[in-house]
Image (cartoon, helix red, strand yellow):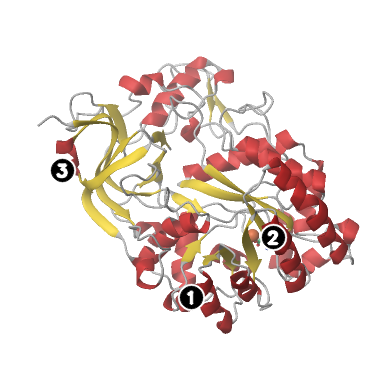
Amino acid sequence: QPREPVDLLVGPAAQVATPVGTGCPPAGPEQGRLQVIPEGAVAVRDGRIVAVGPYADLARRFDPAEVLDASGCTVLPGFVDPHTHLCFAGWRAEEFERRLAGASYQEILAAGGGILDTVRKTRTASEVELAVALRRRLLEVLRMGTTTVEVKSGYGLTTADELKMLRAIRRAADPADDLDGTWPLGGGAGEPAHGPRLRTNRPGATGSGGPGRGSDVHAGDGAAGAGFTGGGTAGRGAAAGTAGAAATWTAAGPGHARPTTGTPRARAAAGSAAPVAAPAAGPVAAGPAAARVPGTGCAGGLVLPEVVATFLGAHAVPPEYRGRPDEYVDRIVEEMLPAVAREGLAEYADVFCEQGVFDLEQTRRIVEAARRLGFRIRLHVDELTPLGGAGLAAEVGAVSADHLLHVRDEDIPRLREAGTIATLLPGTAFFLREPYAPARKLIEAGVPVALATDYNPGSHPAGSMPLVMAIACVGMGMTPAEALVASTLGGAWAVERARRLGSLEPGKQADLVVIEASSYQHLAYRLGTVPVVAVVKAGRVVGV
Ligand code: NIG
Ligand code: FE
């Protein structure tokens, strides 16, 4: 019987672990239900999953053009991070120190710092500077296994600056956009243009240069250069680029020969799905690998996570409207929302519903105006005080109610009845030293839970979903299986893409993460530090 041709076979893997869709968001017992396949594999064609099962079966059925050998590793669905503020200029390390010394997040905001500090920096950045900084962060989170990410505006707070942010989000997410010629060499807003470089003064005498390498090795280059995205960039010399591209394909950073056992290794396997002997170390440039384009991550060009855009003009009351929040709400309703809708720049509208920021009534006004314009709704609720935002989120049919550290008991059944996803961000609770959201109560009440990073410069300056899973388990009492479901299928539901994303099932998009560990539990158990050794986005392999 002839084998069916496929583009890619990922496997054998020590384990393939995935939630299984039921047509409804995973809730209650479903929240922790995984399909776990030992010695598993995933077959991919045209960017979609064709089959998931034991490697022995799939190797018999399929004739793959390429094989990503994941021996000793675990293959999981790509993480879906449904809540971030990834588009911003500048960091707030001094604020971190002030908080550690006793100042509260709200005090700092009330005094014109916090979010408003980032607003000042973001207003002075150009659209392209924001886009470059954002694209670097998109590549940073892709390296950590996030294949889909929601990104909010909310650091502009004028119509022009919010539009600037949303255009930057759209452009950063478009791999065909070279950001006015600045990508990949340009510096982002408040970021250096490149990372450290190791220069070789005695060619041939160094252990760090790979075959064909020139004299410059780019050790870091922020998120844009080394390793994951293909090492050297076109603008930096073809020699480094070539070595980088090949090394990427073998799941090693450029110039870093890694032990081959236990790391995934892609190779051309025309005519045979049986494992072929891999070279002991160093880049493998067999078949398609040789054709990978330097600096772009993969033969087909730059690979980025899928981005979901949210308008968050109601993130804070800007200084110009200090003491007149209702007038700012008028501005959002009358000017900003229609402008964002006109350009089609965001799918969702969000409000930071919080004491001292936007109250329930103001939130309701914004939500109603947004819904009239066709926006779907997600809300920051009950993050720092029990204002009852979760009840409002349920009442207005929000897709997602986020944070919920102080959710009122009576609002929990309302979330379930409304079909609103509880998106929990335990990394933020950890970082702000606040109490955790009652994940167990929510799960036991049948509310579907998603996890998200909140990646932003103030309340959680990190984009690692595995770290969030670890904090969810240790801090909120979720099980590793629940945390994984919440980070994949749960997140996909929270951005309304669960028909296409969030699990490894035939017909779904081939978004996969390969971790260097023998089981999915290691994600949470290893405190977010387990190496992600390869990512597949819509069928395209990117190595770390
Ligand atoms: O989700 N709560 C409001 N927004 C973010 C923080 C943004 C910032 O501090 O810059 C949050 O925690
Ligand atoms: Fe947030």
Mark sitting earlier along the chain (3/1): 3
Q: Position of residue 311 (x, y in %)?
A: 69, 52
Question: Ligand 1 shows up in which quadrant of the image?
Answer: bottom right
Q: Position of residue 199 (x, y in %)?
A: 56, 23
Query: Where is 237 relative to 450, above or below?
Result: above
C-beta proximity under 8 Å, tags 2 and 1: no
Q: Residues within 10 Å of mark 3 (few under 14, many from 20)?
A: few
Mark sitting earlier along the chain (3/2): 3
Determine if residue 282 is in view. Answer: yes
Distance of label 3 from label 2 (alpha carbons): 52 Å
Tell me which residue sits at (77%, 68%) in the image. 362
Residue 127: name its quadrant: top right
**Left or right, residue 178 beside residue 479:** right
Q: Secondary structure at mark 3?
A: helix
Q: Which residue is mark 3?
A: 57
**Left or right, residue 336 beside residue 477:** right
Q: Residue furthest bottom?
A: 410
C-beta proximity under 8 Å, tags 3 and 1: no
Determine if residue 209 is in view. Answer: no
Q: Secondary structure at mark 1?
A: helix
Distance of label 3 from label 1 (alpha carbons): 39 Å
Tell me which residue sits at (40%, 33%) in the image. 540
Q: Which residue is mark 1?
A: 442
Tell me which residue sits at (77%, 40%) in the image. 125
